Structure formats: structure tokens, C-alpha cells
Image (cartoon, helix red, strand yellow):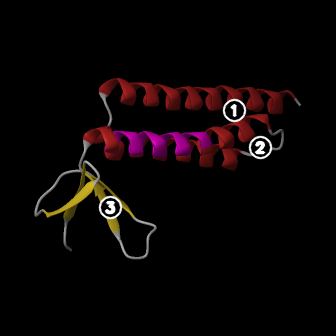
Amino acid sequence: MNNYVLESISKTLKVTYITEYKGYSFLSKSNGIKEISIIDFDIASFIVCSKFIKQYRRLLSIVCHVISDDDTEEGDVLVTFTEIDRLKEILMYKYSKFLKKDQLEKYLKQIKLLETELKESNILNERKGMAR
């Protein structure tokens, strides 16, 4: 695979061939380009934050649905805990290289709050089930 750097310098583009790089890589939705790698830390951080926020919002809606639904079964709760763990692992092992320490701690704290809320609601649901 050929690796090129595309630089924008005062309204002109400069293309440079590179052999080694460290950066955030992801698959492209474009037909001609298979993979895009971002070398600039600030841009990579912005992209990683955007991806995390999108995944977090999806997970938040799942957790809210599980908590608010009276017909929630134990399997739904276990799947939700699995999704929380999956997002935590992605954040710690894949995204952590591109986040500042305070951002990483903030995102981990948000995930921990979701996990705690789900645990508390699950305990309350179990107690309600025993009382019946």
C-alpha cells in the first residue's frame, strides 16, 4: 500500500510520499480510497472524540430504554453491560493514544456513571420482582 501525505499550504496542495507514520487510521467510505490515516494529533483527537460521542449517545439511549422499560429482562441488561464494557475497552485501548489525559478521564467517568445507573436500576427491578 502506498502512503501519501496531503498538505494544504496557502491554497495549494502538496502530496508527499512517506514510508513510516504513526497516526489514527480508519476505513474510508469513498470508493477510491481504502484507508485514511490522520497524523496530526489535534485532528485525530477531534475525530476520536466525535466517534466516542456518537457511540456514547447510542449507548445512552440503549441504557435509558432498558431502565425505563418495565418488560426488561435479565438478558437485555446483560447485553447492555456487555456494550458498556466494549465501549470502555475501545476507549482505553484504541482511542486513548489520541486523547489527552483529562479527556480520557472525563469519558471514562461518563461510562462509569452509565454503568452505575444501570446497576442501580437493575437492583431495584430485582427487588420489585421479589416483592410480587
Residue topped by disc 1: 122
Relative to 64, 131 lies left or right: right
Indicate which disc residue 36 carries.
Answer: 3
Dot 1 falls on a residue whose secondary structure is helix
The one nearer the camera, 84 or 77, is 84
* Label 3 SS: strand
- Looking at the rendered structure, the kind of residue marked 3 is Ile
Q: Can you say which quadrant of the picture contains the N terminus?
A: bottom left
Q: Position of residue 5 (x, y in %)?
A: 21, 59
**Nearer to us: label 3 or label 1:** 3
Relative to 113, residue 91 above or below: below
In the rendering, at what x and y percent does residue 77 appear? 66, 43
Nearest to N terminus: mark 3 or mark 1: 3
Q: Is residue 109 magenta?
A: no
The three-letter amino acid code for the residue at tag 2 is: Thr
Measured as percent of width and height from the top left, residue 120 is found at 66, 25
Distance of label 2 from label 3 (alpha carbons):
41 Å
Locate residue 104: give its quadrant.
top left
Give the residue pinned by disc 2: 72
Amino acid type, callout 1? Asn
Give the magenta part as a residue range: 44-57
Q: Give the residue at x 69% y 32%.
A: 122
Label ID, residue 131:
none
In the displayed structure, 117 sits above or below 35; it is above
Measured from the top left, where is residue 38 in percent x and y? 29, 52
Q: Nearer the viewer, mark 2 or mark 3?
A: 3
- Asked if the magenta segment contains residue 56, the reply would be yes
Horizontal arrangement in the rendering, residue 30 relative to residue 55 (left or right): left
Question: Which label's residue is closer to the chain start, 1 or 2?
Answer: 2
Residue at the location (35% across, 71% down)?
A: 34
Furthest toward the left, the residue is: 19
Density class for disc 3 (Cα within 10 Å; few <14, some 14-19, many ≥20) is: some
